[in-house]
Image (cartoon, rainbow, N blue to C red):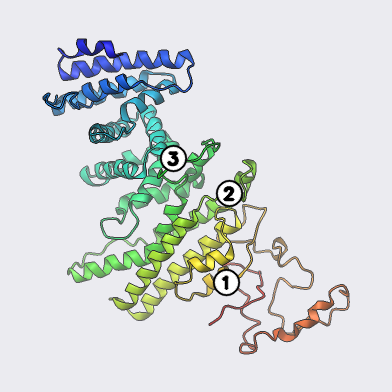
Amino acid sequence: MGDIRQSLLPRDVLSAAKELLYHLDIYICNLVQSGRQPSQVDSKTLELVEEFILHAPKDRNAPARRMSALQELQLLEIMCSCFQEQSRDAVRQLMFSALFSLQGNQADESRMALLGKLVSMAIAVGRVPIMECAATWLQRTHRVYCVRLAQVLVDDYCSMVPGSVPTLQNIHSASPRFCCQFITAVTTLYDLTSEELTPPLELLQMIVSWIQDDPRLVLITFLNTPLSGSQPISSLDLTPLGGLVRWCVKAPLAYRREKKQALTNGTTESEPEVGPLFSGLHLSVLQVFMLLPNILNEKGLFGRLGLLQVESLAALTSDLSRLLDQADKHTHTSSADSHALSQLTLDRLAQALQVAMANGALLCSREDLRAICSRLPHNNLLQLVLSGPVMYYNNIHTPPLAFSPHAAHSPIASHPTHSPHPAHPTHPAHPAHPTHPSHPAHSTHPAHTPLPPHPSSHTQYPAQPFMAGMPFPFRPSH
């Protein structure tokens, strides 16, 4: 395509860009039809794109070509039509890559600016092919640029134009792949470390409603991505699960900080309560974890691929340790409220860890897990998780907050000498069961002698709220 440059130079900027798009479409169609592998646009074509569409000057001393706002809008409409009219997905994907794959040069800033405007327009006018191409771009691009695109979309639909959130909400049905990648990018962007990095309320409500309506939405990219090769370095996570867990766990502390800052600034306006939103989101995330055993087994990946990364978990616990220390030193709430919020944070972390490990989403030994959580303050539920066995369940439709309410479903409770109701003071040492002669070793645990400081409370302790009917042969240290 290098020979068409001379014909493009005399044209005005919009006409030249339109003509180049026309020739680019023909060129890529021929490239795909030829069957050459891999299909790749040559460097001269990329240079034409940079010069006549992105308006990066070919010569350093040459004046830059600029479009007016109206011409840029017309170019975006032309590009939307171009992708909409092209019926072959392979051609669309390769054309999108030629236009917007980052090259590590000065034209990348123009690429990002044009990409943000094109995807924003595609959402507004319902151009699904562009959203699908953008979903692929989000999978293959460095997360720094993915976060920038997400920021543009959030600004356009949640800040600049009031009442436009319903338009953004439609991407759930229009392009689930793009919606999944958008959630991943948004949870990477908003890590709750500051007020600026806390998601807008409308965005939070929208994401929670998406996931509550369809928990499998967050697995769309994973389900549709061949895992024969490794993910690009520094790309977004394969699913938004890590970011969603971070949101749910950090929310009580992060929003307490926002309230404190509001009081400090003299703000008295009542903000909508976000607690129920994060509670619902936490429940939905646990439900997604419960879906994973069947999916991972079908792909032959159970025990081989962890969708929740140990590195992100370590970063989360480090943040929690710092936030909890700050909360103890600076709080404008009562000490009881402060303690309750801190314990809620640790409870959610413990629940997420247990359900993720039990369902193959987190591949981590108990020793490593204890090391990762060593700096966190004491929490009864977290102590149980760090000390107890990993529980595997075949039935993924059990209650999402953990585990089957029937002890027969539990590998621990399946032992005939352990009743599903542990608080039976009439059987203190298990020796009075003559029907089980093959288990004489039970006599070595008379009255649970390893725990003399707590003999009276032992019969009540195993009734854990998150694991109903599941006794544990240990107690956390106090």
Marker disc for residue 232: 3
Image x and y of residue 94, in percent:
39, 24
Q: Which residue is mark 1?
A: 384
Q: Sequence order check: which comes first, mark 2 or mark 1?
A: 2
- Residue at the image point whose x is 52% and y is 56% from the top: 286
Residue placed most toward the observer, 391 or 401: 391
Circle 2 Cα neighbour tier, 10 Å, few/some/many (<14 / 14–19 / ≥20):
many
Marker disc for residue 266: none
Q: Is residue 468 above or below residue 149?
A: below
Query: Which kind of residue does numbered mark 3 sit on?
Result: Pro
**Numbered disc in front, either 1 or 3:** 3
- Left or right position of 105 against 323: left
- Left or right position of 261 against 37: left
**Numbered disc in front, either 2 or 3:** 3
User: Disc 2 versus disc 1: distance between alpha carbons?
Assistant: 23 Å
- Residue at the image point whose x is 55% and y is 36% from the top: 228
Asked which secondary structure carries label 2, the reply is helix
- Residue at the image point whose x is 20% and y is 13% from the top: 8
Image x and y of residue 305, in percent:
56, 48
Circle 3 Cα neighbour tier, 10 Å, few/some/many (<14 / 14–19 / ≥20):
few
Residue placed most toward the observer, 412 or 317: 317
Asked which secondary structure carries label 3, the reply is loop
Q: Which residue is mark 2?
A: 292
Query: Which kind of residue does numbered mark 1 sit on?
Result: Leu
- Left or right position of 110 against 126: left
Q: Sequence order check: which comes first, mark 1 or mark 3?
A: 3
